Image (tube, rainbow, N blue to C red):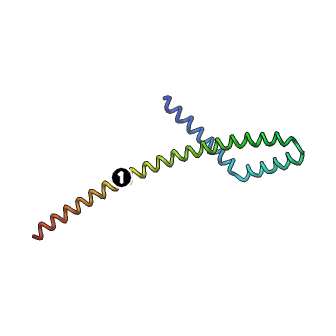
Amino acid sequence: MPRRRLIEMRRLRQTRLIDSMNSWVGSWGFLVIHVVWFIIWLAWQWDINMLTMIVSLEAIILMILLLMAQNRLSIRDDLRDEADLQADLQSVGLSEKVLREVKEIKREISKLQK
């Protein structure tokens, strides 16, 4: 397999992994598990400093995942905006062409009426 194809396949796998993780993190199940975990931790009076460190590390990892997903969406939006711009420029060009042809037709009609 060409190297470029392998890179694309790896990037696709990473994208799917990030999307699935973000989907899980943004779910009610994730929230419920954390609430139950926090209640158990606090009820058993385990070391609160350890909980703070675990939650902080988790927050860092989750933020990185969210930023990666946001970057990918931003790239997709940029590509869509570029495609929209190209379509708009093409429409303007066609509109100008139609306008020139209409003016030419008006000139021809004007000549015929004289």
Name the one closer to the observer, 67 or 1.
Answer: 67
Q: Quadrant of residue 46?
A: top right
Question: Residue 17 location, x and y as percent?
Answer: 63, 41
- Classify residue 87 as left or right of residue 19: left
- Classify residue 39 as left or right of residue 5: right
Question: Residue 60 location, x and y as percent?
Answer: 69, 41
Question: Residue 111 location, x and y as percent?
Answer: 12, 66
Name the one closer to the observer, 5 or 70.
Answer: 70
Residue at x-position 90% and y-position 45%: 44
**Which image quadrant: the C terminus?**
bottom left
For mark 1, give the secondary structure.
Answer: helix
Question: Residue 54 location, x and y as percent?
Answer: 77, 40
Kind of residue sitting beneath label 1: Leu
Label 1: few (<14), some (14–19) or many (≥20) C-alpha neighbours in 10 Å: few
Q: Quadrant of residue 13?
A: top right
**Residue that badge 1 annotates:** 89
Residue at x-position 81% and y-position 50%: 36
Name the one closer to the observer, 1 or 65.
Answer: 65
- Classify residue 101 as left or right of residue 21: left
Give the vertical position of 108 relative to 74 (above or below).
below
